[in-house]
Image (cartoon, rainbow, N blue to C red):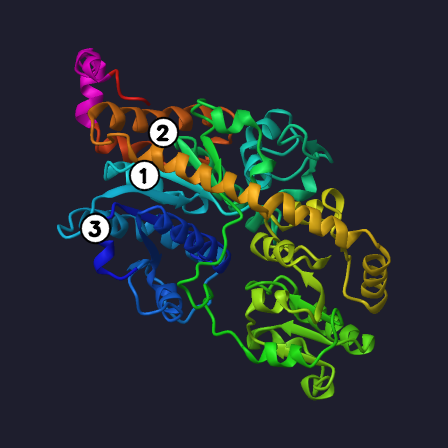
Amino acid sequence: MGAKCALKMPKIILVPYPAQGHVTPMLKLGSAFLGQGFQPIIVTPEFIHHRITANMDPIDEIRFLSIPDGLSEEGPHDFFAIEKAMENTMPTHLEGLIHRVDEEEEDGRVACVVIDLLASWAIQVAYRCRIPAAGFWPNMQITYRLITAIPDMLRSSLISKTGHVAGCPQRQGTVCCLPGQPMLSTEDLPWLIGTQAARNARFKFWTRTLERSRSLRWLLVNSFPHEFTGDDHNSTDHDNPIVFPVGPLSKPAIVKNPSFWEEDSSCIDWLDKRKPNSVLYISFGSWVSPIGDAKIKTLALTLEALRRPFIWVLAHAWRQGLPNRYLERVSKQGKVVSWAPQLQVLQHKAVGLYLTHCGWNSTVEAIQCQKRLLCFPIAGDQFVNCKYIVKVWKIGVKINGFGQKDVEDALRKVTEDGEMKERLMKLYERTMGEEATSRAVANLKAFLLDSTTKQFNSLKDVYIMSEGYRNASASSSSSLNSSFQDTEDDQTIASILAEEENLHKDGRLAKRLSHLDSIPV
């Protein structure tokens, strides 16, 4: 489909969190929208815009637009620098961009803005522009439910609500996030990373994300339809958006690769020369810093001692931990690359096992390619993903360290489990087979029908969206530490709805809304 065919298509603006593991599924979602007759426009900060567009074919099926972020293009940018840019710099620029895109005469209007929940700052921007906003969770729904359980964990004193230790477990405990699903532990909480100050800041980030997302009517989830119950999809509770499982989203055919970095295609030629199921593939995603030089050195020595063929994805920035002349020493046994065409690698018959950080995109690709897993979770949702891989689906083994005995024990457990391959095959069919795919497509169509047929420009819809945002923020404030409340949160939407609020106060709003009762809300 060329650029001319895209004219007058209704547009959907997509706002991902600016990280590889979030942009990739958002790009896949955009491709799915394109297949349903919508023009996807993905908005990213400038510091990653050039990385993404460098990997796109020179066609206009998916548009990429950038907004200023105040960050240098060189990077690297940590979680806190990105958060500061999202909160302080990007909102004004996104608002201007939405208005410009919506007013383009040659194209269709903006039907909806789909926002990664970790980019929750954009929710308020969409409401200011009077455009419907939907949330997108790029991971399993169970990890989203773990975030929504924060108020319950605070009320039960499972986690602290006090000052600098807010969000930290006060005791060992479990949380039931979904009926019929495994209990999750306080050890699985995604903000328990780094120093105490870092944990506190991350917990604040998640509480703010939760408060903002409660105003959303719709939530698209990049997970398997069978993970959800009917209650999720049919819920009309404002604190719980209508959930549409639309995953797992597949790689768009129109994109060379959805990667920020150049892929080393020589991996495939190297694999062609290896025996079936003989190669161990190792990748910890795009964020390796928490592993550190010491662990990298230990793993390097273990791989060398195993004398097993391997491909290890390790960026140049993280190779300081490699032993002296390591690449030369293992040149006949293994291959170390900065970035790999992961899906192609996992599809190759020579790859038998995958040592992974359990990122959701990597987990989905492993299931798709039916590869058994050695699990070493590092951060965020990876701990929950690991629990499902090991305890629920039983398609992998967790390793506790990179010492030779740790890895050898894990390899033995995987290879001795003769039923693991059969479980992988059944899991693939259940989650990615024809029936599951049909359900995911049907859910996507249902979302588009519900979200794009509503008249958001009406006074009633604008009022209800903004009122829901403020009510959600107020109701959650009682259970969250007041120190986490940002003064701008409750004021942003109110500032553009002053007239409607004044009408509401003196009773005239109800009269003006009475003729709009036929509009579903």
Residue with the mark numbered 3: 101
Closer to the N terminus: mark 3 or mark 1?
3
Along the line of sight, the residue nearer the viewer: 432 or 239: 432
Residue range in magenta is 498-516
State the image quarter where residue 157 is shown.
top right
Q: What kind of residue is marked 1?
A: Gln
Residue with the mark numbered 1: 124
In the picture, which quadrant includes the N terminus? bottom left
Contact flag, marks 1 and 2 (Cβ < 8 Å): yes
User: Magenta span: helix, strand or loop, mainly?
Assistant: helix
Along the line of sight, the residue nearer the viewer: 324 or 363: 363
Within-10-Å neighbours for mark 2: few <14, some 14–19, many 20+ = many
State the image quarter where residue 53 is shown.
bottom left
x, y (%) of residue 183?
70, 34
Which residue is at a point 64% across and 78% down the rendered structure image? 336
x, y (%) of residue 124?
32, 38
Q: What kind of residue is marked 2?
A: Tyr
In the picture, which quadrant includes the C terminus? top left
- Alpha carbons under labels 3 and 1: distance apart: 18 Å
> Residue 331, relative to residue 83: is it above or below?
below
Q: Looking at the rendered structure, which numbered label has been put on residue 469?
A: 2
Which residue is at a point 68% across and 78% down the rendered structure image? 322
Residue 311, magenta (yes or no): no
x, y (%) of residue 300?
73, 75
Which residue is at a point 69% across and 45% down the rendered structure image? 388
State the image quarter where residue 294 is shown.
bottom right
- Alpha carbons under labels 3 and 2: distance apart: 25 Å
Closer to the N terminus: mark 3 or mark 2?
3
Q: Is residue 244 left or right of residue 61?
A: right
- Alpha carbons under labels 1 and 2: distance apart: 9 Å
